[in-house]
Amino acid sequence: MAVNGGMEAFTGSVPTGWTANDDSLVSRVGLQGRVHSGNWAVNLADEAVLFQEIAVEAGCFHQLSFFARGEGSQVGVTARVLYLNAQDQPTQALLIQVRQQDMVNSNRVFAHYQGITSAAPAGTVRARIEFTVTAEGGQSMDLDDVSFSVA
């Protein structure tokens, strides 16, 4: 259900189908060791927020899965799924938080993160998948192979 979860297509510096809070904090990477699969991954600098909204049905559970690695030793990420109703009122459905000291940062090594949401409440029309990065001193995070599907 996620569009371009493999981060293989880009519009400028942002993966096609995704939105960033600041395009200058997002870039395409293709260097060996910085891509989990395919030819490209997306790199998110400190304070970058990358998100996508997807139509969903109320009552369903969803699974979020992604691969990430730190480009530096002080990189963290908060991944969340919010359910939105027709008035854009959010309900938090899933939170995955990786502290800076816990992010994998070895070359060619990605950690796999996944979680299952709570059931989408009545009135839900969309889910928002969102990644927010915190990094020290010019460090960043590589993100690839994002999957969001009915669990």
Image: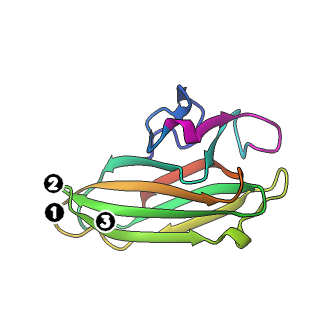
Say whether marks 1 and 2 touch (CB < 8 Å).
yes
Q: Residues within 10 Å of mark 3 (few under 14, many from 20)?
A: some
Secondary structure state at the residue bearing disc 2: loop
Where's residue 95, x and y in %?
A: 47, 71
Nearer to me, 67 or 70? 70
Say whether marks 1 and 3 touch (CB < 8 Å).
no
Nearer to me, 51 or 140? 140
Where's residue 20, x and y in %?
A: 46, 42
**Mark 1 and mark 3: span between their CA atoms?**
12 Å
Amino acid bearing label 3 = Cys
Q: Return the disc, 2 or 3, that comes first in the chain's sequence.
A: 3
Q: Return the disc, 1 or 3, that comes first in the chain's sequence.
A: 3
Where's residue 102, x and y in %?
A: 71, 72
Amino acid bearing label 1 = Gly
Amino acid bearing label 2 = Ala
Q: Is residue 35 left or right of residue 79?
A: right
Where's residue 6, x and y in %?
A: 59, 41
Q: Is residue 109 left or right of residue 45?
A: right
**Mark 1 and mark 2: span between their CA atoms?**
7 Å
Does the image show residue 151?
no
Q: Is residue 68 left or right of residue 131?
A: right
Q: Which residue does the numbered mark 2 point to in the structure image?
A: 86
Q: Which stretch is magenta?
A: 23-34
Secondary structure state at the residue bearing disc 1: loop
Q: Which residue does the numbered mark 1 point to in the structure image?
A: 123
Q: Which residue does the numbered mark 3 point to in the structure image?
A: 60
**Mark 2 and mark 3: span between their CA atoms?**
17 Å
Q: Return the disc, 1 or 2, that comes first in the chain's sequence.
A: 2
Nearer to me, 134 or 102? 134
| Colouring of the image | rainbow
The label nearer to you, 1 versus 2, is: 2
The label nearer to you, 1 versus 3, is: 1
